[in-house]
Amino acid sequence: MAYQIKSIRYQNSPRKILLQNINGPCPLLAAANALLLRGVITLSSECVRNGVASTDDVVNMLANRALIRSQQSSSTSSSLEKSDKDGNDGNDNDTTNKPSNHEYHLNEVLSILPTLQHGMDVNPQFTSPQSIEYTHNLAAFDLLGVELVHGWVLDPQDLETCAVVEMKSYNELIELVIGGDERRREVVRLEGWKVEKEEELMRLIDSGNKGSTEGNNETEVKSKAQTEKDETKVDSKAQTEKDKGVKESTETDEGVEVTSNDADDSESSTSEQINNQCQETVSLEQQQAIEQEIADIGLKIEHASLQISRADVANAFLTSTSHQLTYHGLEQLHAHIGEDAVHVFFRNNHFGTITKHDGILYLLATDLGYANTPEIVWEKLDSIDGNTEYVNEYFEKPSPRAELAPAAGPTIDPALLLAQRSQAENDYQLAMAMSRGESSVPTSSSQHASTNADEEEGKLIEARTYHGENDATVAVDVDNSTLPSTSSSAQNSQLDSDHQMALAFQRQEDQLNHESEQLARQLQALDQQEVQMQRQRQQRNDTNRRRQPNSSRPAEETKAGCTIS
């Protein structure tokens, strides 16, 4: 991936920023721009000369920044450990061969940096702009000295939503919403089960009532039969006694028979009563068990309904704030970000560079479409609905252009610029070699002078590429006083002329490319004008053809009439 470079001014100092061709996440770009605006890192002279930086260039630049901060942190921690050791009178020897944690931390961050070009997982919480779940990716921002903030903050006056969201993160709210959908399906299943159990309970109650009615009817029949037997017994005793012995034996036999029949009847009645009681006990236990099941199902439905309502509240919050910015979040950002401080801003899975100037929040405009539009540098962040305006590098609203003209300079795909960079560098080195002629290997002194000259050249090119100056009229004046003195003044003079020749060659090549691009634009405009004129002529011809038959028809009719007469 390649990033085109744009020159701006920030806090009255020239700065370089990286533009993004594809509107993707890329936290790597946002972190690099934040550090470039602060002036703590700079692009290499090769990148500045060619106006494009590769991913490797950006990663190496940030890795150097992380290494420097790690060394500073290591020296600070070493001094603290030394003071602690002196305070312990040398009794603590456990840290003699102990590896430092910052080395592991640095290695981890250096392995993370290349992956940031593809995006980064961010799990924000909704309590403050800096409340983000800490992951190993955020360690890179910490070591680079860049803070990641967001504006997706919940208003504490919304008590109902606060009771549900609390300290939950975005991922936890998503799990809550998904759990609510599952509970909704579970409630439907439980309600169907509850209806089945209620129907079963009603059938059990109806069968118990029916059995009780049949038992009462049988008891009444048996009582009537017993009454008839008792009456028959009384009548047998009232018979006239003809033979006393025979009568007594007869009465005794009948009494035994009657007694035997009464015993059988009482035993059957007792067993039936026991069976009825057992059946009633069993049906009562079944009824209680079913009632308990129905009560348990009701509790489950109530608990699931509560989770559903919480999930609905969470889903409503995520839906209403789908743009991932709230007015309360804007207020918190104003309070958290200091004046002219630079942070990385996360919103809608996109990472941008944010600052505050004169109490107003601004986002850095890094779209490639603004590469040749110097009057658009910042975008106001004062609304959550995207209704905003653009300002220039001085945070002022740009004046409208006097005429609609193509942007100054070519807008070439950064990938193409990156592919051309190697050839341009080869041409540059060839020009440098030709200017030196067949000179021998430079001495250490001349090598040191060449290194400083490259640094001075990078500064000159950076000043030349700033959009406020004209490339054709830039005066190249290398300050020889900044170059170290060598053993021979001829080497300084030769080196001076070499750089002037190389810069002149580079300016000539840039000018030719610019003129070629402008000529191509003019030819394209002429072609479009010619096509437009052809279309207009075609339209006029078509209009004339439509009108011509209508005007000639009456003459033909007249001529035909004259011929007939």
Image (cartoon, rainbow, N blue to C red):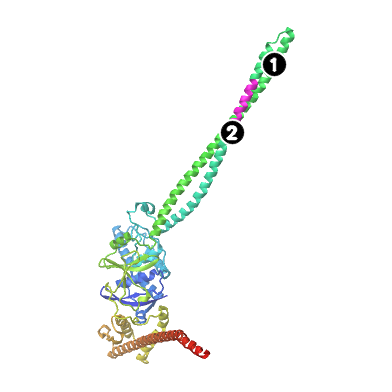
Q: CA distance from mark 1 to mark 2?
A: 38 Å
Residue 210, label in figure: 2
Q: Is residue 71 above or below residue 219?
A: below
Q: Residue at x 68, y 10 (%)?
A: 238
Q: Is residue 156 magenta?
A: no
Q: Is residue 169 visible?
A: no
Magenta region: which residues?
Answer: 213-226
Residue occupied by mark 1? 256
Residue 86, label in figure: none
Tell me the SS state at disc 1: helix
Q: Amino acid at mark 2?
A: Lys
**Which image quadrant for residue 467?**
bottom left
Q: Is residue 421 visible?
A: yes
Q: Classify residue 315 as left or right of residue 482.
A: right
Residue 56, given in percent of the width and then of the height, sits at 41, 75
Residue 449, given in percent of the width and then of the height, sits at 31, 84
Q: Residue at x 42, y 64 (%)?
A: 121
Pointer 2 local density, CA inside 10 Å: few below 14, some 14–19, many at least 20: few
Residue 382, given in percent of the width and then of the height, sits at 30, 65
Tell me the SS state at disc 2: helix
Residue contact between numbered discs 1 and 2, judged by CB atoms under 8 Å: no
Q: Amino acid at mark 1?
A: Val
Residue 164, given in percent of the width and then of the height, sits at 39, 52
